Image (tube, rainbow, N blue to C red):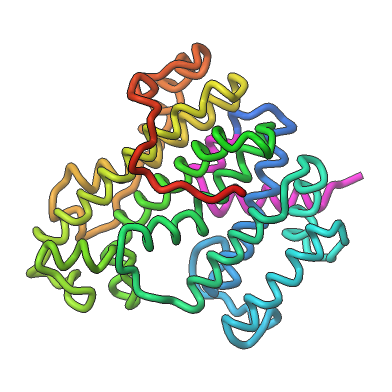
Amino acid sequence: MTDAVLLAAHEAIAKGSKSFALASRLFDGGTRDRATLLYAWCRHCDDVIDGQYLGEGAHDWAIWGSTPGERLARLRDFTDRALAGEETGEPAFDALARVAAETGMPPRYAHDLIDGFAMDVDWKPVVTENDLLTYCYHVAGCVGVMMAIVMGVPAGNHATLTRASDLGLSFQLNNIARDVAEDAARGRCYLPSDWLAEAGLTVETHADPANREALHRVVTRLVDLAERYEASAAHGVPALRNRQAWAVLSAAQIYGDIGRKVRGQGPQALEQRAYTRRRDKLIAVALAAPEAIWKRNIRVSTSPDRTGLWTPDFE
């Protein structure tokens, strides 16, 4: 019998994220399927809110509502139905229902992501680093937590789930660093306004060509912060099985390299979107293999102390 829900999920990941698709191939079959099902739900919700399809181009999601607020309300309703074990007739939500049933994933983490979409719909300026990290948790850190649960980390193991959240935070911080100019062009700034003020910039003018050098210093600060969370996340790797650790370490290197390229290329990096070539991704995968086998990594040699890092409230 054809598994239509799983097939739709695999199509979503193949078209929506080449980096995630590559890393997911390193999982064992069961973990890969659950990770793909979870991705399909996340991708669909993101697309509906952003008016895109698989992260690209404009798409008319009027069937989900005529306004972002209406679409958000319907996404929340279908998510609640899926988490309650109902069949929705929508592949992405039936995918979520399957993941929740198979892993015992607490509903709160899916709700946390929906709350992240609500933050995008009812946007409020990012003023402080805490504002930034709270937003990053709700759009990416909680996905890291859900992925850890998909990989078999018990929902009560908050120490490891915190490290998983840290990985999601690092991914999102690097994405923000990469997309600063694009975001500014659409009237959105994720950089804390107090960081900008320290650099002599404002939310309104930070992306002006004349401000590239000052803006790059702020972006460098962002990438430095992402690396702190990436290093912290590595301390969660010993809780994973070898193939899962391999996928996580590969993804961490691939996404981390995006930010490091933006930082290393100087102000000109803000002129065009940085990306990681397939060859570099394959190198990252190869280098992560021995680290995963030995559950040891140069980043893990750093102190496991998370003093000063933002922490989600799991209680």
Residue most toward the top?
294
- Quadrant the N terminus occupies: top right
In the displayed structure, 90 sits above or below 164; it is: below
In the displayed structure, 67 sits above or below 38; it is: below
Q: Is residue 119 magenta?
A: no
In the displayed structure, 90 sits above or below 33; it is: below
Q: Where does the image place residue 15, in percent across and percent down from the top left?
A: 57, 53
Classify residue 159 as left or right of residue 303: right
Query: Looking at this view, is 213 or 237 the one in front?
Result: 237
What's the magenta bit mostly, secondary-structure-wise? helix
Which picture quadrant has residue 66? bottom right
Q: Where does the image place residue 306, in percent across and percent down from the top left?
A: 39, 36
Residue most toward the bottom?
66
Query: Looking at this view, is 54 or 41 the one in front?
Result: 41
The magenta-colored residue range is 1-24
In the displayed structure, 197 sits above or below 129; it is: below
Q: Is residue 20 magenta?
A: yes
User: How many discs appear?
Assistant: 0
Q: Where does the image place residue 312, in percent across and percent down from the top left?
A: 51, 49
Q: Where does the image place residue 137, in percent across and percent down from the top left?
A: 48, 54
Which picture quadrant has residue 197? bottom left
